[in-house]
Structures are given as structure tokens and as C-alpha cells.
Amino acid sequence: MRAVCWYGTHDVRVVNVPEPKLLNPRDAIVKITSTAICGSDLHLYDGVIPSMEEGDILGHEFMGEVMEVGKGVRNLKPGDRVVVPFAISCGRCHYCEHQLFSLCDNSNPNAARNAKLNGFSGAGLFGYSHLYGGYAGGQAEYARVPYADVGPIKFPEGLTDDQVLFLSDIFPTGYMAAEQCDIKPGHVVAIWGCGPVGQFAIRSAFLLGAEKVVAIDNVPERLRMAEEGGAVTVSSEEDVHEILKHMTGGRGPDACIDAVGMEAHGSTYDVVKQTVKLETDRPYVLRQAMRICRKGGTLSIPGVYAGFVDKIPFGAAFAKGLTLKMGQTHVQRYLQPLLRLIQDGKIDPTFVITNRVALADAADAYDLFAKRRDHCIKVVLKPHEIPPPEEVARATVRAPREGETEEEVAFSVPRSKRLRRE
Amino acid sequence: MPTVKTKTKSRAAVTGNPRKKVVRACTIRRSPEELFRFWRRLENLPTFAKHLVAVTQTSDTESRWVAKSPTGHTVEWDALIINEHENELIAWESKPGSEIQIAGTVRFQPAPAGQGTEVVVAFEYVPPGGRIGEIIAKLYGEEPELQVEDDLMRLKALMEAGEIPTTEGQPTGRDQKNVRRCE
């Protein structure tokens, strides 16, 4: 099968690999019909997440059709369409029983190594480094899903892939970020980062009753999308601190969401320190949010941090009695309630999709997303679909040879080369 | 002889031949009875202890142990259960004259608020010299604590989730590095 594999910083390739097979009784094999590139995949792409190995299959936002189940899986059968949460959870440990699925004790085969770094290990994650289990990801034609009796959610007929795909990560992640803010009537929520998670956080904050949402970013199309979601926008190039203060009558936002994480832009100091490995993460947004947050407010952090940060104004957080909430999303907890929101038409997650790309063009899609080219906000890949005819026409520089199928022609021209020539 | 590093202070049994001691604890959502029963059937140990190939019980208190290092060397020894309190504790040591001098205890104590059982493993061994010493060093690596913790986590997963998490046998593009990209 074809899979998107990581070979180093800014080196992602689509290669042929063997198809996955059942390894444990509670496994399932899923034929992936839709998969997406996540903002957190860009941290892998940029080489700032430790313990990646050459050839690792990427991807943790995916869904598809169940092909095969192990003898321990009784709630799924071949043919079922499912969305797969990005965190792998056993469903039976202390944390799973307490709905803290991303802290699962049993799903990470490398938990002891992770614990050496972090004290204790979180759950295994699809396609997200060996410290998080080294599981093959879902940017591929097929994937093996461990503990398939716990994670994947079946969804009713009539819903399209695009409507439910983001239940795998970014919708629950944005929702949990907003839920952690403990929003009360009249609350103002400031959200740094208007990528897909930020976009879902904006909409979730309103669904949870926020009075006003202020969205901060420096990419015009992202800010536009935030405005469409009802947010007031502020460019991160401006004096965000002063503007937020004025906007909130001098109080500061009741809650702040850092939907940017470890690769924030805006501080040369951190770029230099990260480059020379004196710091693993660039906490520019975290600092800003910590200083502007209202007294007694909440700082909610869905953006990924992986190591050490520097010059954190912890005194400000202490002085103002802030509440800090963070961590990987407990996706399984949100699947049913958010599916209901989609079914009831309260939200249509497809708004965030800007680019649809064939799996063969995934390497370019990473570049596109990383450089925010082509107004890219969210890329969706369809591993088993032939690209639409116009895409084929654009990607093809020659007529099909005799005996060649449409698909073979479509995948025969590496878009990487074509784009670079342009 | 490669030395085995350990952070715990070692008590010297014999000068120049320090004992290595490893202690690790893990809470498992199962009753002490259940865990004791599982562990006491020593044949079960290799299902979660990575370096053990086989343990065969030769009498109620005697057993034969076979372990393998990552490089494929095997080492065998006989062990004796020297102390046992049902559902609480098992203690064993290698028989005098064995290739390996090793002694261990496992305790099962109830965790607070019904969180299961605290399993505490402690063992001491004398790193022997020569070939056996090298094998032992490889069995436990440079970080014996990590190995034991790894084994305990595998036991925990087996008891709680019914299976041990693994990625062995999954696809990877590792061998595809120099292969033409699939286009």
C-alpha cells in the first residue's frame, strides 16, 4: 500500500509499504477513506518532536471502513464506517475509566522510556513519534487500529466523510480547549492561533456561551475564517496585549486559549535558542497569554508542547491565580456529543477544508500547509479515490499510454517536481 | 567486563563485587489474589518479562529459569522460593552454585480507594564476571530499572487490557529509504 512516511526534517515521502495486519486480539484493520494533515504534524515535519525514526508512517486524523477485526472486538464488523480517535486508549485502566483517555496507562509500548522524560507516560498516539508508541499512522491506504472496541465511533448513514472526519482530532481538541475555559455568560475568550484547532475552538466557545471571542493570528485567510465564525480578530503583528486590554474594558480576557504551541512565531530569542537546542519549544504565545489573562482566569492549552520552555512569566500566573489546563484531547469523551452537534446542524465541520489532495501528492501538501501557500488551512487526503478530473489534468503533462488506467496517469507525475518548476 | 550502572546505592556483599539492587512499583487494577495467582504460576512470567524465555516449575518451590540477551546468548539457572505469603508476597533466590546469583521479592498490597494492587518488585544480583557477566549486563542493559519498569507495565497491560501493546510487525517505510518514491 502507499503511505506517507517521515524521513527527516522537511522530508516526507509517499512510498510503498506492506499492508498492516492484526497483531493483537483487540485490533481492527481499517481501509482509510479520508485522512487529514494536522497542524501538529507540522511539528514532526519541522523536526522538533524527539524520537521520530526514518520510515515512520505519519497521520493521526483518519477514518474509513472496517476490513477485519480481531477476536476481541465484538462491537465492530467488516463494512462498518468508523472515525478513529488519534489517541489510543485501552478503555480499562484507571485513566480510561475516568474518561481521561489520552492518559491511558496501557496503550504505549514505550511507556517506560516516555516516563523517563516526563515522569509518567501518556497514551500511545497514531503516527506521533516513538516516545508515544511508534504506532504507524493513518496517512496511508490502510491502518491497524489497536483497542478497536474502545476508540472508533460508528456514525449513521447520510453523513459524509468530510462532515465527521474531524471528530478524530481537531473538533474535539478545539471543543475541549473551550470547555476547559469554564465559560460563563459574559465571558470574553481570546484564542491565539486560527489554524483548524483555533477555528473549532472559536465555534465551540460560542456554542458554550461565550459573549465574545477574540482571535489572534497573522495569516489573512485564517483571520477571515475566524471572522466568519463570529470572532473579532487581531493581527499578531499588532500590540496584542494593549488591544486585548482595551477590548475587555481593561479587565483582560476571562480565558485564553493557546492553539499555537511549541512553534510560535514572534520571538527571535526563542527561534535562536530552539535552533541551537538550548530550548525545545518556543513559548511566545504562552507568555503573552499568561500576562494578559484576567485575574483568576483560565489558560487552556491545546497547542502541543514537547519539552522545555524558557522565560515563562510564572510569577504573573501565580500573582493572578490563573488556572492552567492542558494536554492531549480525551477524544473518546467527545465523540458522541459532538456527533450529535453535527447531526443537529449546530456545526458543519467541513467549513475548515481548503485543500483536497491525492495521497500521492502528500509531500507537497505538507509543504503547502507548512508555508500556508495557496490559502491552505486544512488538507484532506483521500487515499482510495482517484483525484477529480481537473486535478488529474493539472497534474498530468502527458496523455495516458496504452493500457494505463486513469489512476496510474494521475499518480505518475510527482507534483513536487511540477510545482518546483513553476 | 561491562559495568551495570544503577542509581540505587549498592551494598557491597563482597568487596569489589558489588550487588546491584533494583526496586520498581506499579499499580494494577486487579485484586492482590488475582495477581498473586498469576505470578505464582511461574510459567506465566515470560509472557510479560521480555528477557525470559521460559520458567519451568520442577517442584512446588523449585524452578528452572532460561533467559536470553538481545544478542541471543542464553543463560540458565535454578531458583528456589524461599518465602511465600498467600496473596501478599513471593520471595525467591537462585540455588547456591548457580551461574547467576539473584534474589527477588514481589509484594502485592491493596492500593487505596479500590485502585487495585500495588505490585512492588525488588531484586538483587551479583554481577558476575566473564561471559555470564556480559550476558547479564546485556539482559538488563545499562538501565536495569527501565527494564523492570517495562516488564511491570507489560504485566499491567496484560492484566488490565487483556493484551500487551505492540507495534512489532506493523508496516514501516524504513527499508524504503533509497527506493524510488511511489508516484
Image: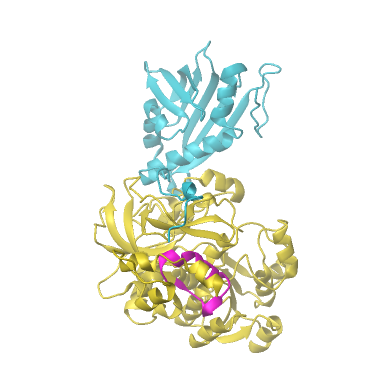
Provide residue A227's location: percent of width, then percent of height.
52, 87
Provide residue B44's location: percent of width, then percent of height.
38, 30
Chain identifier, colour cyan? B
Quarter containing the C terminus of chain A: bottom right
Residue A10, by quadrant, is: bottom right
Based on the picture, tell me whether residue A361 belongs to the magenta stretch: yes
Question: Is any atom of residue B30 visible in this view?
Answer: no
Provide residue A137's location: percent of width, then percent of height.
44, 57
Q: Is residue A25 left or right of residue A354?
A: left
Say above or below: A357 vs A228. Answer: above
Identify the hue of chain A.
Answer: yellow
Provide residue A293's location: percent of width, then percent of height.
65, 76
Q: What residue appears at the point 47 percent right and 24 percent down from the top-left corner?
A: B67
Q: What residue appears at the point 74 percent right and 63 percent down from the top-left corner?
A: A272
Viewer-proximal residue among A146 and B44: A146
The segment highlighted magenta reads A357-379
Q: What residue appears at the point 70 percent right and 58 percent down from the top-left corner?
A: A279
Question: Is any atom of residue B181 visible in this view?
Answer: yes
